[in-house]
Image (spheres, coloured by chain):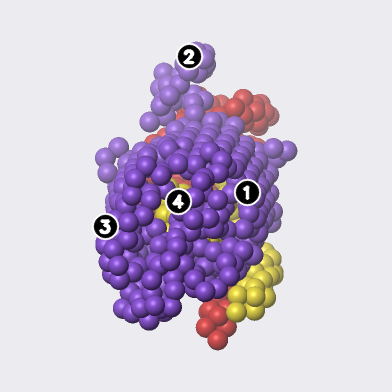
Chain colours: A purple, B yellow, C red
Amino acid sequence: MQLKKSSKIALAAASLLGASQVSIVSAADWDHEAAVLYYGESDDRVQDASFKYKGKRTNDDDNVLTLGLGVDTLTGSSPSGIAPSGDVQIVATPSGNGTTTYPANELTLDDTFLDTRVDLSASWDQSIIDDNTRVNVGVSVSKEYDYLHLGLSSGISRELNNKNTTLSLGLAYSADTIEPVGNTPIGLSDISAAKGASDESKDTIDFVVGITQVLSKNTILQVNYGLTQADGYLNDPYKRISRVNSTGTIVQNLNESRPDKRLGHNLYGALKHDFSGNVLSSSARLHSDDFGIDSITLDAKYNIKLSNRRSIEPHLRYYHQSAADFYAPQLNAADPLPAFASADYRLAEFDAYTLGATYRFGGSKDREWRITGELYSQNPKKTNLTAGQAGLDANPGFDAIMLSVGVKF
Amino acid sequence: MIKSLIPSLVMIALLSSISACSSSGVKPWERGNLAKSSMTFGADSMIDTTDDHIYFSKEATSGGRSFGAGGCGCN
Amino acid sequence: MFFKKILTIIIILITISSSAMAKEAKAFDLSAYQGKVVMLDFWASWCVPCRKSFPWLNKMQSTKSSNGLVIIGINVDEDTADAERFLNKYVATFKLEYDPEGKYASYYDIPGMPTSLIFDRNGKLIHQHSGFKLKNIAEYESAINGALAK
């Protein structure tokens, strides 16, 4: 157990100590974690299967190196943003290489959506000045067919009051490059119009400040305030929005357009309380930004100890967001074009509920296993389309299941 | 609605800090329960990161938690 | 309205949990160890550095007992069953005492976990250190040797 991964120097030191029971050697400890996840939405929408690995190496100076790897494969279809219609629609695909046929009276789902994403991350965490102050730096990279992300992060934390209070500060920067299939569409241009550049960039800065406070032997609180500024290409290059006349006929389909800056801030509070071995973890988060999106997230988990190495943790989450100022399920053909418009269902007003549970149990060789099953339901606020589209719903919402199995070893 | 809640949450945070300071905090030998991973923020970072990634892809807002803290407080 | 209820519940929770009962403090009775150097090592099953300290403490006890060193591990787990589980994995060949209510820990106002207190042959506290790092074992050992030399 003690002699996990030792270098030759450590073995030499052990013989110097004359230890017949070779156990006092300085060796780094590795903690590994791996998980597989399946995510699947109703109505043949998005399906994702992923594998994730995280390794943490702690050395005798309490410096921590963390390495992460993730692979995701995405299949299925996603709402295109084009309004549902009583007529069959044949529209050009985003790549410009063909057309898609949307059946009448149905949500227009784009099924040319197959991608694999790989992400890598590394971070270093160590104490500086004294044992109560720690700094961390990290890098992350992720790549999928049409998207590249590069990120840097840093943070500092200080413990006070006999380690009952921790103050933390974090700063992160991301430089993303988007290379849409078929080139970047011009915002609010016709979907068949000529496209623009082959790639676009987006920069994001995140700043978070937080305090973690031990309230009692059984209670701990964390409050964080965060600011995010995004600049650059914030559109979804594959999402469209329709101009519909009063009889419900789609007269034109346009590429969506969002502002090129977004400033948001959020306030997050989390409280954990130990009720004689069962732990309640609760959190609330408020968000507001200049896209006009306000949201509230309430989350609660209750970890019930079944035995020394087994527990079950039910989970409940409630989320509500208001719509973005420029969101509309479709545009009225008679109105002048707005500056920005998007029919992306993710910018609409909706309630979302998650109900799930995680079962944890200990396996051989000190391994800790977990099985998680969750149900997610997104329920948008109903919006009325034109009389000619009576009975059609531009954003009916969806349900999804998430299943994952993980192991710590 | 959101803006009127911020003063209440700030008040909770301040009240909590004040009451904790006045009871002089939890002693180092009393941190057994706080050392449990279920009582440590960020202990289950893989579930948290996966959840955050899914919600980031399906909802318009993200962020909030990002600091691991708590724990046994051992030296 | 909903949020005022949450605020009230949180304040009640905090008040209940923080209601500190006066803690008894008790000095460790060293009268049985007159003439010996006693090292009290405060440890707990949840204390990660303690896993590394046990092999070293075992070695100190076995190599220096002939010089009069007595190591006593004082366990502060509130549930001693947790301590037993730890001891099954990390064997201790030194004496063990249990302080689940933290009476000894309070008396010596232990500043961190783990903490070692070294008492000279007359029972006077002459050295203490908190934390355990393998890179510092030479330092820890010289403190013990210093006490044994007197």
The kind of secondary structure element at disc 4 is loop
Q: Are marks 1 and 3 in contact (CB under 8 Å)?
A: no
- The residue lying at 45 percent from left, 44 percent from top is C96
The chain holding disc 2 is A
Residue denoted by label 2: A8
Residue B26: horizontal and vertical position, in percent?
60, 60
- The residue lying at 43 percent from left, 78 percent from top is A246
Residue A16 disc label = none
Q: Residues within 10 Å of mark 1 (few under 14, many from 20)?
A: some
Residue denoted by label 1: A232
- Is there one chain holding both mark 4 and mark 1? yes
Please tell me which residue lies in front, A18 or A74.
Answer: A74
Mark toward the start of the polypeptide (4 vs 2): 2
Q: Please, what is the three-letter code of the amino acid marked with disc 1?
A: Gly
Q: Please, what is the three-letter code of the amino acid marked with disc 3?
A: Asp
Residue denoted by label 4: A192
- Is there one chain holding both mark 2 and mark 1? yes
Residue A44 disc label = 3
Q: Please, what is the three-letter code of the amino acid marked with disc 2?
A: Lys
In the image, which is nearer the foreground, mark 2 or mark 1? 1
Distance from the alpha carbon under mark 4 to that under mark 1: 24 Å
Mark toward the start of the polypeptide (4 vs 3): 3
Mark toward the start of the polypeptide (4 vs 1): 4
Quarter that holds the N terminus of chain A: top left
Q: Residues within 10 Å of mark 3 (few under 14, many from 20)?
A: few
